[in-house]
Amino acid sequence: MPWSVRALNRATLARQLLLERRPVGIVEAVRQIVAVQAQEPASPYLALWNRITDFDPAHLDAAYARRAVVKASLMRVTLHVVTATDYPDFHHAVERSLRAFRLSDRRFAELGLSADEIADLLPALLDFAAEPRTNAECQAMLDARMGIRPEPGLWWALRPFAPLIHAPTGGPWSFGPRPSYLSGRTGAPPADRAESLRRLTVRYLEGFGPASVADIAQFTRLPRTAVREALTSLVGELERLDGPEGVELVDRPGQPRPAEDTPAPPRLLGMWDSLLLAYADRSRTTPPDYRKVVTRTNGDLLSTLLVDGLVAGVWRPVDGAIEASAFHPLTEAAWAGLEVEARSLLRLLGTRDPDVYRRYRRWWAQLPGAEVRRLGS
């Protein structure tokens, strides 16, 4: 029997620790989520608060500090938090796409260097980043080594694909607006890119499957041919499933597949939660009518209400409360669940930044008509 959208939703929620909070540590939770979106420093904290029983933000601070989890540019050339164990293979698997993102830009030609010359700068840059370095320091080092080049400069060319992680710089969410960088290479890089692609594919399916080739390509920003090659190399380790409307899906055997009538508690997801960005077909988590509402024209993905496993609205903190805007009528039971979540979220924000995501408030004026309630006050 083909999988329904609702069954896919419940499988995804189970693997993303969103059917129930779990009493797990930070590293285990990040590993299960696979890759935590981290464009905004607060978002990994909110992602883990949504998933871990009695989440303590100090534990994530400590995991960053000891580099048990690391923040870096990875899939889709965006910032993610991943385990230190996963980082080498993830970076190796997507490095070509990260490199192409910059070196295919017309501005690269203006630097007057070949792709090989840019790549040859990496060892010196990684040695320099043995201790935290700012953007300005990295640019100055490269300019001194190779001579000052036309803007935007050598650092602009290298930064997206160099194996660098972000060094914690302080502030309420461990990272501030001015990043510092550290070498993310603690040994030789993985030698076999095909093996790194396989590992990334397996890890994706463990956290987000069942999924299609298009879904995996969307998450990784890898060509579909590369995804198919990785899946072919995993024959015997994967299951092929019938998805909605005849789409072929693949999955790892033995992963959670709860019944589609399994209750899904409400959640207040932070901006860019990985749950909402991991698929080409996002209908398993986001009703099609709402996709362009919560994903703005510049790519900003708003903080969302998750009700019965689906996006049902957005939220923001306002004057010591959570303002929740629902896109359709919700039951009183759903509102009661959101109230409990809001009180817990306000306690977390109160220890760090009660006005989180303040600079994105401009989008609220453009939201469609909705039922708005003040929660947690």
Image: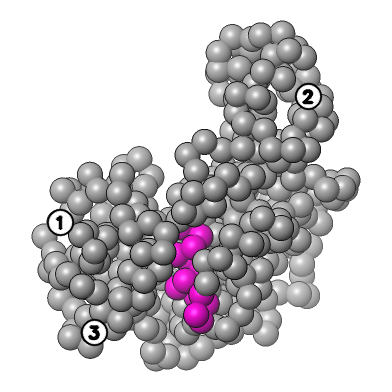
Residue occupying image coordinates x 74% and y 38%: 131
Q: Amino acid at mark 2?
A: Leu
Q: Amino acid at mark 3?
A: Ala
Looking at this view, is 159 or 217 the one in front? 159
| Distance from the alpha carbon under mark 1 to that under mark 2 | 49 Å
Looking at this view, is 218 or 207 the one in front? 207
Marks 1, 2: nearer the viewer: 2
Which quarter of the picture shows residue 46? Answer: bottom left
What residue would you read off at disc 3?
336
Q: Which mark is residue 368?
A: 1
What residue would you read off at disc 2?
121
Give, as a single range, the part of the protein colored magenta.
Answer: 43-55
Residue occupying image coordinates x 49% and y 54%: 173
Q: Which mark is residue 26?
A: none
Instruction: Give the mark, 1 or 3, whose residue is nearer the N terminus.
Output: 3
Q: What is the x, y in percent for residue 139?
A: 64, 21
Looking at this view, is 337 or 320 the one in front? 320
Residue occupying image coordinates x 46% and y 57%: 43
Instruction: Give the mark, 2 or 3, whose residue is nearer the N terminus.
Output: 2
Whether the magenta-drawn stretch holds residue 17 is answered as no
**Mark 2: few, some, or many residues within 10 Å (few <14, many ≥20)?**
some
210 with respect to 69 (left or right): left
